[in-house]
Amino acid sequence: MAISGTKMPTDTALLTLIFDVVHWLKWAQTKDAAKGQNRPKSLYESLTQTGTKEKIESFASAEDFEQQRAALLGEIDGNRDRESICSDHPTDEGREGRSGE
């Protein structure tokens, strides 16, 4: 659970998925299914919120995009600035023996 980030045990998740499939199969034999109406809601999705849609943003300019990108990268990297992120990675500068090989 902790590794996958889920809040329910694996056996419970499997049981809810089995329930969803059986419920859907039963629904598939009804007149509503033939008409494509009243499809059953997934118990698994309601418990895990996997069916929620992500927020999609658009930007009016490249500057707006860069500002939002910098803010998100700051959140991910513990508010480290871009220079410190780039300085964490080695570059070809300062490496000895590279130019003579």
Image (cartoon, grey):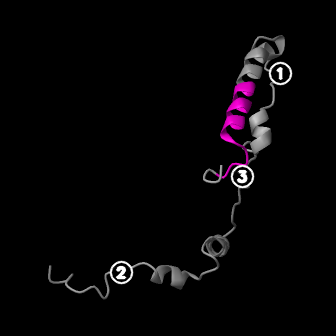
First in residue order: circle 2 vs circle 1 = 1
Residue 100 found in image quarter: bottom left
Q: Regarding mark 3 in the picture, which secondary structure is present there?
A: loop
Residue 94 found in image quarter: bottom left
Q: Give percent across and percent down for residue 20.
A: 74, 27
Q: How far apart are labels 3 and 2 at the CA level?
A: 36 Å
- Residue at the spot of label 2: 91
First in residue order: circle 1 vs circle 3 = 1
- Residue at the spot of label 3: 54
38 in relation to 3, above or below: above
Q: Regarding mark 1 in the picture, which secondary structure is present there?
A: loop
Q: Give percent across and percent down for residue 64.
A: 68, 73
Q: Nearer the viewer, residue 57 or 77?
A: 77
Amino acid tagged 2: Thr
| Residue appearing at x 74%, y 48% in the figure | 53
Q: Which mark is residue 37?
A: 1
Magenta-colored segment: predominant secondary structure: helix
Instruction: Verify whether residue 49 appears in magenta.
Output: no
Residue 40 found in image quarter: top right
Q: Regarding mark 2 in the picture, which secondary structure is present there?
A: loop
Label 3 environment density (alpha carbons within 10 Å; few <14, some 14–19, many ≥20): few
15 in relation to 83, above or below: above
Q: Nearer the viewer, mark 2 or mark 1?
A: 2
Q: Which residues are magenta?
A: 5-20
| Residue appearing at x 75%, y 38% in the figure | 45
First in residue order: circle 3 vs circle 2 = 3
Query: In this rendering, would 45 be left or right of 72?
Result: right
Q: Give percent across and percent down for residue 36.
A: 78, 20
Amino acid tagged 1: Gln
